[in-house]
Image: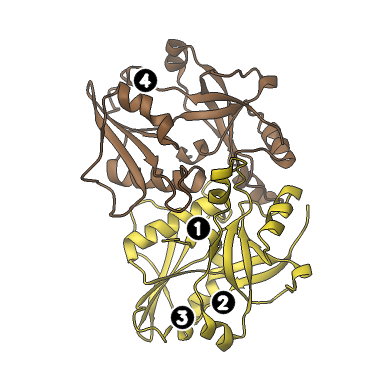
Chain colours: A yellow, B brown
């Protein structure tokens, strides 16, 4: 196993989004509630009581207005059996889908901590924005399916966000394991990734 | 890489379900449209035109009545960029969630082909029903999160189904890669799995 250095993969402020008049509602997907709390406090968001989501779904919704932006932070709840944050692509994909249905956001952001590769220039406490995303644990040797599994996507260009917040920029690779097997390392290297997380890819829509 | 033998992980007939008066609507999630077509033909199902699902979602819905059962078979569509079936846990979890919202099924079945392990007694063309499901590619070395990642669940007891259809029974391990890395093999062995697939786990609800 290889242990990537902890770092932050995306940093978000609403100020940075105000340049676009068409953005009114923002959904921020964060896998762990502890990661979300600093933003919840900064934006003075309220925890949802009368949910817009179907009864019984295992999500936490913080929302409120910041200037003229409707800010929504959504996290999976703790797993009811194991008592830990429901990290990974399955929880994040369901939460993102349901958020799109319920809140019709103009912008979806995935934010949180990630692993970073020292050899690629990442350091602890760096703030990165992903320039591209891909999977490293959906391997398929059938030629037509190989690229579907990896699913490489370029991110939106955000030059103002990057310069205003002085962010580092690098490719991100997503997989459902916190650790990294030798095979994962081969795949992450093939993805040319600087940062490694467990959810970011699923907030992506290629069309 | 190790290549498990092709086999079938679950076989389904509506007759086998008729014992329970409370089952009226069945959803069958199948990852590949080719796998679904024999059942679509057998049950004389129609492909959906006026969808109950949100506009633009990438799913195919076959439905119809068989005796007094409302049968629904749902498949992900081909990936629009890569032109292959959208296999794996993310597509299957979204499709299952949306099916529950739209169709309120009494029973959800995941059916399809799977890999099987000869050393565990599996042969090509065997029909298995999973006695338990677990993930093999959601590794997390943090002790509290390890079991969440694996997520081991026992299946419902289906003694009549097993004896009426003469099914083989074995544990199933789910992961997002078609191939199997050395690390996957270690995890699949730890799961004591006879069959290996790419979607089954996500149709499971532990509560």
Taking depth in this image into account, of A11 and A157 the one nearest to the observer is A157
Q: Measuring 50% from the left and 36% from the top, which residue is drawn there?
A: B200
Residue A123 picture location, percent across and down: 74, 74
Secondary structure under tag 3 reads loop
Name the front one of labels 1 and 2: 1
Marks 4/2: CA–CA distance:
51 Å
**From this viewpoint, is residue B196 visible?**
yes
- Outermost residue, front direction? A143
Secondary structure under tag 4 reads loop
Residue A127 picture location, percent across and down: 64, 77
- State which quadrant residue A142 falls in: top right
- Does B175 appear above or below A206? above
Q: Measuring 58% from the left and 71% from the top, which residue is drawn there?
A: A131
Q: Are marks 4 and 3 in contact (CB under 8 Å)?
A: no
Q: Are marks 4 and 2 in contact (CB under 8 Å)?
A: no
Taking depth in this image into account, of A159 and B158 the one nearest to the observer is A159
Q: Which residue is mark 3?
A: A43
Q: Measuring 66% from the left and 66% from the top, which residue is drawn there?
A: A195
Q: Which residue is mark 4?
A: B13
Secondary structure under tag 2 reads loop
Sequence-wise, the earlier of marks 3 and 2 is 2
Give me the disc on residue A202.
1
Give me the disc on residue B151.
none
Q: Which residue is mark 2?
A: A11
Rendered-image quadrant of the C terminus of chain B:
top left
- Left or right of B98? Residue A205 is right
Marks 1/4: CA–CA distance:
34 Å
Chain of the residue on which disc 2 is drawn:
A
């Amino acid at each position: 196993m290889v242990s990537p250095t902890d770092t932050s993969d995306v940093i978000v402020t609403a100020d940075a989004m105000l340049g676009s008049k068409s953005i009114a509602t923002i959904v921020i997907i964060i896998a762990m509630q502890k990661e979300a709390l600093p933003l919840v406090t900064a934006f003075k968001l309220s925890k949802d009581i009368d949910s817009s989501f179907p009864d019984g779904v295992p999500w936490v919704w913080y929302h409120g207005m910041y200037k003229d932006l409707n800010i929504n932070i959504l996290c999976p709840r703790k797993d009811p059996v194991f008592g830990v944050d429901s990290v990974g692509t399955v929880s994040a994909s369901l939460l993102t889908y349901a958020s799109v249905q319920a809140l019709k956001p103009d912008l979806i952001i995935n934010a949180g901590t990630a692993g970073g590769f020292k050899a690629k220039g990442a350091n602890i406490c760096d703030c990165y924005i992903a320039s591209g995303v891909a999977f490293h644990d959906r391997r398929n040797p059938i030629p037509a399916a190989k690229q579907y599994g990896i699913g490489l996507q370029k991110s939106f260009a955000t030059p103002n966000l990057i310069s205003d917040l002085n962010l580092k920029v690098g490719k991100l690779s997503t997989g459902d394991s916190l650790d990294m097997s030798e095979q994962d390392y081969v795949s992450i290297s093939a993805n040319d990734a600087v940062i490694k997380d467990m959810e970011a890819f699923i907030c992506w829509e290629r069309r």
